[in-house]
Amino acid sequence: MGMNMMEMIMQAAGGQAPQQIGSQFGLDQQQSQSAFAALLPAISTGLKQNAGTPQGLAGLLSALQDGNHDQFLDNPANLSHQEVINEGNGVLGHLFGSKDVSRAVAGHAAEKSGVSADILKKMLPMVAMMAMGSLNKQTRGAGLFDQGQDGGGLQGMIAQMAMQQLTGGSQTKGGLGGLLGGLLGGGARKQQVQMQRQASSAHQQGLGVLGKMLDADGDGSSMDDILGMLMNRR
């Protein structure tokens, strides 16, 4: 694949994206780049954890397809709009689960970057939207949303399999579905196993498309542990 998330964001807008955002908080170029480098691993880890199930990956791909996040790579000034900040906070809420985790992430990033935690907390939703923009551009370039023969492409396959896992397949425990399941016996179980394998295959294929971007954050392994502990405390 192409560039990873850190590279895409650092090179966005002719390499001026971090500075354009950081200058809003009185940061110089070096401080802005340090802030991004300290915050991105947490967001990357949150995205990896969120995409760890077919349901989570299907939700992420749906958000990427429905949004227009790649605009922020070309026009980072748009990140200062309140509605964009609100959307970024929504992304953070989905990834981290609570404001306490976001505050802890900002505190950890402050220790690494030397930028105050208060500024980093305000930058977090903007950085989250930049992260979504980089994923948006990469997934479109990789053809994840291309229409296949069934009209859904890989994204549609992942969403379908995620729904099947949530509902336990097409059968229900009671009523006609349960009766037919009992009559079909091994045949129904075989079909369920096949669907689970298909779900796993589609999920792994989708993760393969995103893997390089989400792993190449420069601090992935340590942030996996740190963010895991923070989220377990919420």
Image (cartoon, grey):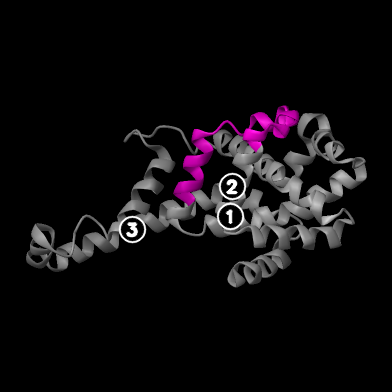
In the displayed structure, does residue 72 sit left or right of residue 29?
left
The residue tagged 1 is: 95
Q: CA distance from mark 1 to mark 3?
A: 20 Å
Of mark 1 and mark 3, the one earlier in the sequence is 1
The residue tagged 3 is: 166
Residue sitting nearer the eye, 124 or 44: 124
Q: Residue at x 79, y 35 (%)?
A: 17
On the image, the x and y values in percent for residue 96 come to 60, 58
Tag 1's secondary structure? helix
Residue sitting nearer the eye, 142 or 57: 57
On the image, the x and y values in percent for residue 54 come to 43, 55
Q: CA distance from mark 2 to mark 1?
A: 6 Å
Give the image quarter of residue 23.
top right
> Is 28 inside the magenta-drawn segment?
no
The residue tagged 2 is: 91
Q: In this picture, is 30 found above or below 107?
A: above
Chain part drawn in magenta = 57-84
Residue 73 in view (yes/no): yes
In the displayed structure, does residue 36 sit left or right of residue 165?
right
Residue 4 in view (yes/no): no
Kindly identify the amino acid type of the residue bearing the numbered disc 2.
Val
Q: Which mark is residue 171?
A: none
> Which class describes the residues within 10 Å of circle 2: few (<14), some (14-19), or many (20+)?
many
> Is 74 inside the magenta-drawn segment?
yes
Tag 3's secondary structure? helix
Q: CA distance from mark 3 to mark 2?
A: 23 Å
> Which class describes the residues within 10 Å of circle 1: few (<14), some (14-19), or many (20+)?
many
Q: Main secondary structure of the magenta part?
A: helix
Give the image quarter of residue 55.
bottom left
Foreground mark, 3 or 2? 2
On the image, the x and y values in percent for residue 212 come to 64, 51
Figure quadrant of the N terminus:
top right
